[in-house]
Image (spheres, grey):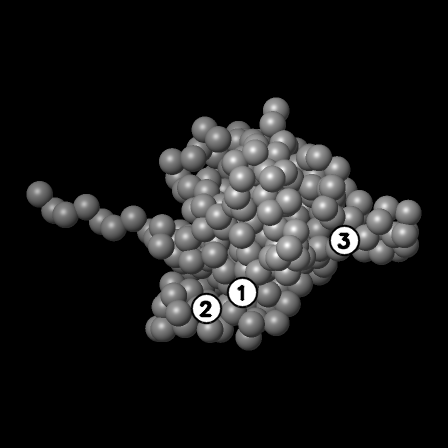
Amino acid sequence: MAAPLPEKIQTAVVTGGARGLGADIARALHRAGFRVVITAVNADAGTALASELDLAGETAVTATLDITRPEDFQTVLDKCIERWGSVEVLVNNAARTAVQPVLDIDPQDFNTILATNAGGTFAGSQIFGRHFKERGYGRIVNLASLAGQNGGTATGAHYAASKGAILTLTKVFARDLAPFDVTCNAIAPGPMDTPIVRSVIAPEKMQAALAGIPVGQLGDPIFVAELVALLAGPKAGFVNGACWDVNGGIFMR
C-alpha cells in the first residue's frame, strides 16, 4: 500500500506579528505546523522573528501590512495566493492602545482608534473572508479584550469601544461565513504578564493590582497564543462565533 500523501501545510497571516503577543502567536502557530506570514507596518520589524522560526524563509516570512489600509490586506492575500495557492487562517491581532480619561478624549482621537482597531478587523475579515468563502474553508481569530466587556476600567473609552465592536464583528462574520466551513472566533485577554502591562503598573502597585484578580496572578500570553493556534486548526470547526475569556475571573458570564 502506498504511503498517504502529506497534508498541505496551511498558511496563517498574523497582523501585528512582529512583537509582543503577536510574536507569541506567530511562534505558537509555527509550532503547530502552520506556515506563518508575520505582518507589520514595517516588514523589517519581523525579520528577526522569521529567521528565528525558519532561517530558510520557507515556513516563516514577513510582509508589510498597515491595518488602516484595506488595500494592504488585499496585497498580502494576493501575494500569498501567488506563492502558495491559498491562505487558510487570518489572525487579527494588531491594534492601537490608548489610556485616557473619557472626558479628555478628543472625538477625532476616539474615531481614529475605533477605525484602526475595529475597522482593521473588519477590513481584514472581509477581504480574507471572501477568499475563505470561495475556497470553502477558513479560520478567522480576532484578538478582543476584557476592556470590550467590562468598559475598560484600565484603558481608554476609545480602546474599550473598539474591542467591544470587534466582539460584535466576530459574531457577524461567524454567522455569515459558517455555511462555507469558515469560522470566526475571538479571544478576550485580561491583564497579561507582558512588558507593556508591567510598565503600566508600578512595582509598588502590583500587589494591589493582583488582589483585584480572583486567581491572584497575571495571565500567560503563551497560553493565549496557543489558544489562537487551537482555534485556527481544522479540528476547531464546531467552535464559531465564540469569545474565549482569559481574564483570571475578573469578568464572568
Left or right, residue 209 beside residue 132: right
Residue located beneath label 2 in the image: 49
Residue at (57% x, 60% y) in the render:
195
Q: Is residue 3 above or below residue 174?
A: below
Disc 1 secondary structure class: loop
Residue type at numbered disc 3: Val
Residue at (35% x, 54% y) in the render:
31
Residue farthest toward the front in the current orientation of the protein: 204
Residue 224 screen position, x and y as percent: 49, 46
Mark drawn on residue 99? 3
Residue at (71% x, 35% y) in the render:
150
Mark 3 against mark 2, which lies toward the viewer?
3
Quarter of the image for residue 171 reads top right
Kindly check if marks 1 and 2 are in contact, taking CB atoms under 8 A apart as contact: yes
Number of marks in the rendered image? 3
Q: Nearer the viewer, residue 23 or 183?
A: 23
Residue located beneath label 1 in the image: 18
Residue type at numbered disc 1: Ala
Q: CA distance from mark 3 to mark 2?
A: 29 Å
Residue 131 screen position, x and y as percent: 55, 47
Mark 1 is surrounded, within 10 Å at the Cα level, by few (under 14), some (14 to 19) or many (20 or more) other residues, namely many
Kindly check if marks 3 and 1 are in contact, taking CB atoms under 8 A apart as contact: no
In primary-sequence order, the first of circles 3 and 2 is 2
In primary-sequence order, the first of circles 1 and 2 is 1
Residue type at numbered disc 2: Leu
In primary-sequence order, the first of circles 3 and 1 is 1
